[in-house]
Amino acid sequence: MAALSLDAQRAELERLGGPIRSSPREAKGREEGALPELPDAIDGKVVLRLAPFPSGALHIGNARMLYVNDYYRRLHHGRLLLVFDDTVGSQEKRIAPELFDVIRHDLDIAGVPPDEVLYKSDRLPTVYRWARRVIDAGGAYVCTCPAETLQANRAKGTACPERSQPGGETADLWQKMLDGGFAPGEAVLRLRTDLADPDPAFRDRVLCRLSDLDHPRVGRRWRVWPMLEFSWAVDDIELGITHVLRGKDLVMEDRMEAFVWKLLGERGPPFLHWGLLRVAEAKISKSKGYQQVRSGEYDGWADPRLWSIDSLDRRGIEPEALRRFTLGFGLSLADIEVPAETLYAENRQLIDPTTPRRSAVIDAREVEVADYPPELARTELPNHPDRPELGRRSVPAGPRFLLAGSDLAAHPGGEIRLKDLVNIELPSPLPVSGPVPARFTSRENRKLPRVQWVGASGAVPVSLLDPDGTHRIGLGEAALAEATPRQVFQFERIGFVRVETDQVPGVSPLRVCFGHP
RNA sequence: GCUCCCGUAGUCUAGUCCGGUCAAGGAUUCGGGGCCUUCGACCCCGUAACGCGGGUUCGAAUCCCGCCGGGAGCACCA
């Protein structure tokens, strides 16, 4: 039901074509703070691109790239290309074959469907054509220095011997690179910039290099691979990209692309950046995550410790919440660290009104209530305290209950209120083991400590996966036996949880993933 | 160290380009109160910011200079 109404809202907004802002609160609060329009954007003609490297699943840190690009695609009715940046990588940064599908799946979940999917590994001939253009324009040379020498020279600002090599010779050496005349590491194609450039990193950057790594898609078909910047200098033009929206960690790449364009007389798209976004709780590394998934230490790409898009979905966090969360930072260039609570707050607003309440107790202990009113063997509870339209449910109640161990421990000898039901008095001290004998006192709703309870009859074992990868075990009310996969509940006084995707209805225990308080 | 970027409340952010309408708006957090039989929601109230120092100007969060602080980049990775 929740999903339905949200989907309906989303569909409606999408139909309107505007930025996705759905709640009235959003409309008044953020509308004026909407992201600025893209420079020189022509409605319907905007082409944007997403360029992930397939080494790990998309995570919360990548969400900004997703939603900012998606925002502008929608705003200007443009196209968004998914271009896998699979230019072999390196020994340390390997492409993981299954990640192509994982990432597409992540985009799906995130609600950012690409208009077209492309692979850099399919575009080598185009890159070679451009490399040739650069060489012919006298803008590059083949350098055969060992990597260390090259770097040392660059740092000092001195030229490698090949820097002055004539264009014809460069063309020959380049051909030799393509033909396999050099082993990996023996030669690179370098851009001739300015050895006096104040930024040492920019001095004669490498355009193309040799690699014999086995590429998951194209194997060893190509040996000469472009560096990321050069491949984009090529494709931002070839693919007709109108605006490059990327994190500011890639600003130097802008310079490199612009340099190549100027050399070749091309006019490229403008660049827009945003600062680094870190979620305080999510200390993650893409490549490290891969190891942990691979080794089985983590529960696949949806392990909550990964903070992957998939894991957020697993936790019942709506893509719309992620979208609002990331778009709320605008295009600010400051590097920021934000508490996950900000994301949770967005999600709460979205799901709270439609999420049914259920009772569950962690670390349950049985309590037997003497003098319990027999007519209260069952009771009826609202599915949502503020939304009568969500209906009510009938649950088994006393005289045998299950209470959270922590609640019991907090009130030995005291009178407590079983929420929505009756008052009971606990013994003191509590028995070390076995059922706790308690005594019914009254039904009136007095100001007593309120505790969550579960009727012992038909109670459902629950296993709750926390974001830190640990599990809490408990017992939930009988109605939970009918819980279906992916259903979201609020366990009262615990938090929002989502039933695991692969939960088989009726099978014990009921496995749920914790979302947030 | 070098290059670039950024400094608005606890945390984010709007405003800075085109100085006055900003004694600075919003979100979230926190504190207090109310309410509903949740540690959730909702309502009310509150704390709390223009990094520092100069300058320009009738007037500066906005322009200029200097300083300080933070971050990112500096690969034959992406």
Image (spheres, grey):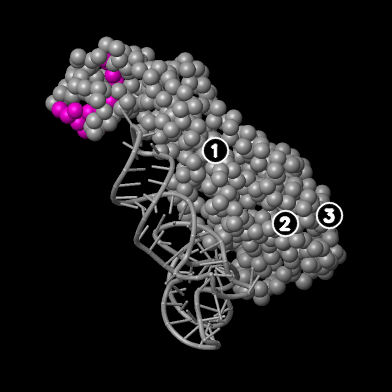
Residue A219: quarter of image: top right
Which residue is located at x 36 percent, y 25 percent? Answer: A360
Do marks 1 and 3 both belong to one polypeptide chain?
Answer: yes
- Residue at 24% over, 33% down: A447
Residue A201 is covered by the magenta coloring: no
**Disc 1 to disc 3, C-alpha distance:** 44 Å
Position in image of residue A509 (x %, y %): 42, 20
Q: Residue at x 33, y 21 (%)?
A: A454
Q: Position of residue A163 (x, y in %)?
A: 74, 69
Determine whether label 2 and label 3 are within 8 Å by CB.
Answer: no
Tell which subunit mark 2 falls on.
A
Q: Spatial distance from mark 2 to mark 1, Cα to Cα?
A: 28 Å
Q: Which residue type does callout 1 highlight?
A: Glu
Disc 1: host chain? A
The answer to whether residue A375 is seen in the rendering is: yes
Q: Residues within 10 Å of mark 2 (few under 14, many from 20)?
A: many
Residue bearing mark 1: A318
A415 inside magenta stretch: yes
Is A395 located above or below residue A126 in the figure? above
Magenta part of the protein: which range? Answer: A399-418
Q: Can you name the residue that lies furthest to the left here?
A: A428
Task: Kindly give the residue lying farthest to the top in the view shown.
Answer: A374
Name the residue rendered at 17%, 29% in the picture: A414
Instruction: Specify whether disc 2 shares its chain with disc 1.
Output: yes
Picture coordinates of residue A68, whole percent (x, y): 63, 51
Q: Which residue is mark 2?
A: A243
Task: Say left or right for A250 vs A380.
Answer: right
* Amino acid beneath label 2: His
Q: Of the residues under marks 1 and 3, which one precedes in the sequence? A: 3
Q: Sequence-wise, which precedes: disc 2 or disc 3?
A: 3
Residue A129 image label:
3
